[in-house]
Image: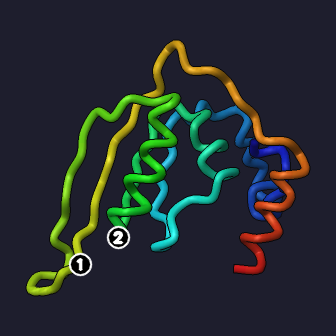
Amino acid sequence: YTNHKPFQRLKENNIDLQSYKITTVLVDPPRAGLDADTCKMISQFAKIVYISCNPETLARDVTKLKETHDVVRVAAFDQFPYTHHLEGGVFLVRRADAPVVVASEESTEQTAKKARVD
């Protein structure tokens, strides 16, 4: 996935992301949660750490991610005492039998454009 967009600072410092075995991704999306392409992309990682301020979108996204991953740990964080706000954290590990699904180049570009607009 790292080949879709050249990162100038990595290039200038001769850092090749392909040489790293990145197996874990951390996501902390906005209240709206993750879009479908991002869910699909992160489902390729062996481990996912998902932090959320919205229990509804957290539940929605984790339900989708459970197609490829198992929930190993769940935690709640009272970041803002005396308010109704609560942060949720979920640690997911990819199942050995999970299918490999790669986002299309077109949908990847659409996600990248959306991220630039947001």
Q: Quick check: 18 left or right of 96?
A: right
Q: Quick check: 53 left or right of 23?
A: left
Q: Dividing the picture into quarters, in which one does residue 41 lie?
A: top right
Instruction: Point out the residue furthest to the bottom here.
Output: 82
Contact? badges 1 and 2 (CB < 8 Å):
yes
Q: Can you give x and y, in whole percent of width and height, for residue 87 in the image?
A: 27, 67
Q: Please state, as top left, top right, bottom left or bottom right, where the C terminus lies in the image.
A: bottom right
Residue sitting at x 52%, y 28% = 68
Note whether 17 is above or below 96 in the view shown: below
Q: Nearer the viewer, residue 2 or 100?
A: 100
- Find disc 2 in the rendering and name its residue: 53
Q: Quick check: 20 left or right of 67?
A: right
- Find disc 1 in the rendering and name its residue: 85
Which secondary structure lies at badge 1?
loop
Residue sitting at x 15%, y 85% = 83
First of labels 1, 2 by sequence position: 2
Residue type indicated by callout 1: His
Q: Quick check: 50 left or right of 89?
A: right
Q: Please state, as top left, top right, bottom left or bottom right, where the N terminus lies in the image.
A: top right
Q: Nearer the viewer, residue 40 or 59?
A: 59
Label 2 crowding class (10 Å Cα cut-off): few <14, some 14-19, many 20+?
A: many
- On residue 57, the disc is none
Q: Can you give x and y, in whole percent of width and height, for residue 112 in the image?
A: 79, 63
Instruction: Point out the residue furthest to the right here.
Output: 106
Q: Can you give x and y, in whole percent of width and height, for residue 46 in the image?
A: 50, 30
Residue type indicated by callout 2: Cys
